[in-house]
Image: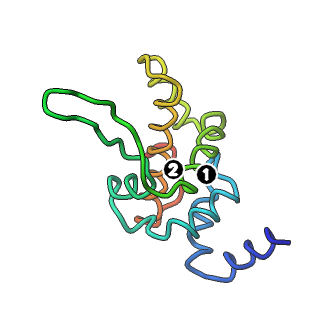
Amino acid sequence: QLDVAITASVRASSIWRTRDDLLKAIPGIGQVTRTLLIARLPELGALNRKQIAALAGLAPFNRDSGKHRGNRTIWGGRADVRTALYMATLSAIRCNAVIRAFFERLSQAGKPFKVALTACMRKLLTIMNAMLKNNQPWNPGTA
């Protein structure tokens, strides 16, 4: 019943409905991810790619001090958005040719699984951000 109520709320708003329809076309993005992004990341489509990645907690931050070069890790941001993108990216690696090719390229370059997956999460988020910013449907040729 809750899923039906959430879907009805999204469909009732013309702005949310437009966003949902654009995001629905991306292979690997399901209903739960779409509704969570619409609800918890209303800035999607309004910020640039660096800002949206930092807001979602997908921007790598360095831990450097003096001559010491520390690790680059992601932290901060909205954890629920990051969790939803993690699951969506696992699905997108299997059914989205653009994300799969990017993941395979990173894996062949020797990147660990989670590093490559995090990079794919950020790429998927920036694709969604650009789609909503330009109000353009999914096009694998330009992604």
Amino acid under disc 1 = Ala
Q: Residues within 10 Å of mark 2 (few under 14, many from 20)?
A: few
Q: Residues within 10 Å of mark 1 (few under 14, many from 20)?
A: some
Residue depicted at 46% across the width and 17% down the height: 108
Residue 23 horizontal/vertical position (percent): 58, 59
The x, y position of residue 115, in whole percent, is: 46, 30
Could you tell whether 65 is left or right of 97 in the image? left
Report how far apart the C-alphas of labels 2 and 1 lie in the structure.
22 Å
The image quarter in which residue 122 lies: top left
Q: Quadrant of residue 81?
A: bottom right
Residue denoted by label 1 = 84
According to the picture, the residue beneath numbered tag 2 turns out to be: 139
Mark found first going from the N terminus, 2 or 1: 1
Q: Secondary structure at mark 1?
A: helix
Question: Residue drawn at (50%, 43%), measured in percent from left and top?
Answer: 121
Q: Amino acid at mark 2?
A: Asn
Q: Are marks 2 and 1 in contact (CB under 8 Å)?
A: no
Percent across and percent down for residue 34 are: 63, 61
Q: Quadrant of the N terminus?
A: bottom right
Give 33 or 135, whichever is nearer the viewer: 33
